[in-house]
Image (cartoon, rainbow, N blue to C red):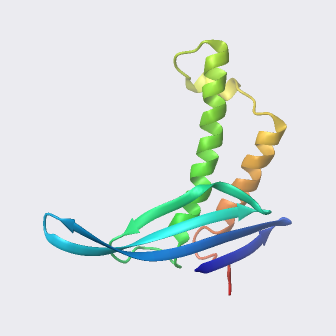
Amino acid sequence: MTRYEWIVDGVKYVAQCDTVRVSFCNSYGKGRCWQQRVQVYADGEAVGHEERANIYNRTWECWEYQSLIEWAFYEEMERIKNRFYDNAKWEHGWKRLTHKRRCSIDFPQDIKDRLDTLNRGYESIKGYNQPQEVA
């Protein structure tokens, strides 16, 4: 198990990562891949669910688990926004959420703070910014 830690603006982020070798059968015969699992925490609080991805060959990543850690942040931000937008649609009786309506919705301060924390963590590891690996 690999563990990454990094701090951005006083918030401590931790990513616990693991890789498992998986065998599978497809139309070409037997194959192998790696399943990566990542759970990200911000100040001890879990960021969404454990994210998983099957890796069939080498990827473009600058460092191991990069895309999956980024995906964990992005997916949780989208879950929060969509949950709030669905509630707004239900409250107003809207069938569709147009761009104009979406822009008119204002998030409560606690949701804004949570999204800001997640976005700072997401932006801090993009590209070559590899967090510190901890034993």
Question: Which residue is located at x 64 percent, y 38 percent?
Answer: 81
On the image, the x and y values in percent for residue 103 come to 66, 28
On the image, the x and y values in percent for residue 130 come to 63, 78
Q: Is residue 85 left or right of residue 32?
A: right
Q: Is residue 13 left or right of residue 30?
A: right
Residue 13 found in image quarter: bottom right
Q: Is residue 26 left or right of residue 32?
A: left
Number of numbered discs on residues: 0
Relative height, residue 2 to residue 26 (above, below): below
Residue farthest along the right direction in this orientation: 10
Q: Nearer the viewer, residue 129 or 86?
A: 86
Question: Which residue is located at x 77 percent, y 42 percent?
Answer: 112
For the N terminus, the quadrant is bottom right
Residue farthest along the left direction in this orientation: 28
For the C terminus, the quadrant is bottom right
Q: Nearer the viewer, residue 108 or 36?
A: 36
Question: Which residue is located at x 60 percent, y 42 percent?
Answer: 79
Question: Which residue is located at x 82 percent, y 41 percent?
Answer: 110
Residue farthest along the bottom direction in this orientation: 135
On the image, the x and y values in percent for residue 7 come to 79, 71
On the image, the x and y values in percent for residue 34 come to 39, 74
Residue 92 found in image quarter: top right
Residue farthest along the top direction in this orientation: 93
Q: Is residue 60 left or right of residue 44?
A: left
